[in-house]
Image (cartoon, coloured by chain):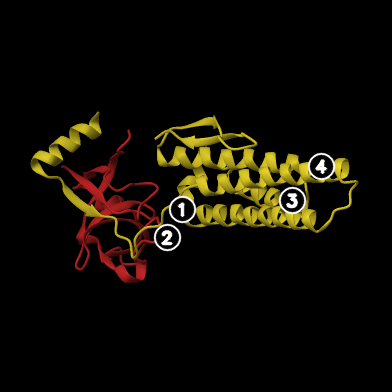
Amino acid sequence: MIFNFLNKIDESFGITEVKAHCDVPCGVYDPIPCQIAGMTVARMMDTITELEAHEVKDHNGTRDLHYQNKITRMVNEKERSAELVKHEIRVIWGDFYKEPQFKSFPELHNLVHEIMLLASKCKQNVDVQASRDLVTKLNRFSEIFWEIKGIASHTIKYHCKPNLDVVFPKF
Amino acid sequence: MIKIVKIKGHSMSPEYSSGDYLFLKVSFFRKKIKRNMKVVFNHPYYGLMVKRIVSINCNGKSILVEGIHSDSVSTEAMGVIPIDSIVGVPFWHVRQRS
């Protein structure tokens, strides 16, 4: 209400602008890419596990070239996505958050460290639970991000398999 | 005395966003200035700016400032800011989505 009132004054009379000047066009920070990467890791865990089970059950575990090609591609995508999670989180944590946000959310440093460890665990292993834990931690990271931005968020089921809960902003 | 200003730019984000309004105290504030306070000041090159105080020089007559965002104009680029060029200090922040 106050903001709208000030906006009306600004439109009618013009309020003096103060520059919060940047050297370069400001970075766009958003946790959604790392959440999607996290869900890709979760999906790859499932497909790798399913492919292996199918191989053992229906192909006597021969693991031919066709199988090796598929599994290599899945592992490669899991590796790439987990690394993307680490990169995106590191940028938001290092460049976007500052002292006031760390004071408001003292859990942030520990949360980021847990995400790093879980992403590494997902790279090193075929561990379905680790991928779910990673997505959960990324959701908490996202929740904090949107709270800091003053934008309401909510939890929804993501539309792609494995249809995990995801925290997105309410635009 | 108070003054209302509108923020343009993102160097103070996430604390202040572009489009937010600040209510400034424009008198009787100079003796209360301390490190980490946000101040609005006139810069000879950049014009009217809002930044955070990094340090107050020994003689108490000038300050060094910084933005909160990593892309902000650097402290070195803004140089030493004379205390007299400070226009006011924010005491109320009105966010766009408040």
Query: Mark 1 — residue?
Result: A96
**Tag 1–tag 2 contact (CB < 8 Å):** yes
Q: Nearer the viewer, mark 1 or mark 4?
A: 4
Percent position of residue A133, x then y: 69, 40
| Type of amino acid under label 2 | Ser
- Chain A on-screen colour: yellow
The N terminus of chain A lies in quadrant: top left
The answer to whether the residues at label 1 and label 3 have Cβ atoms under 8 Å apart is no
Structural distance between the alpha carbons of marks 2 and 3: 31 Å
Q: Disc 4 residue type?
A: His
Instruction: Measure the C-alpha gap from mark 4 to mark 2.
Output: 50 Å
Please check whether the numbered discs 1 and 2 fall on a single chain: no
- Establish whether labels 3 and 4 are both on one chain: yes
Which residue has dot 2 on it?
A: B70
- Hey, what amino acid is under mark 1? Phe
Q: Which is more N-terminal, label 3 or label 1? A: 1
* Residue linked to disc 4: A54
Residue A32 position, x and y percent, is 51, 45
Are dots 3 and 4 in contact, CB under 8 Å? no
Q: Are marks 1 and 4 in contact (CB under 8 Å)?
A: no
Q: Position of residue A143 (x, y in %)?
A: 52, 37
Q: SS at mark 1?
A: helix
Q: Residues within 10 Å of mark 1 (few under 14, many from 20)?
A: many
Rounded to the nearest whole Å, what is the CA distance between mark 1 and mark 4?
Answer: 44 Å
Label 3 belongs to which residue?
A121
Task: Please identify the quarter of the rendering in which residue A120 is found.
Answer: bottom right
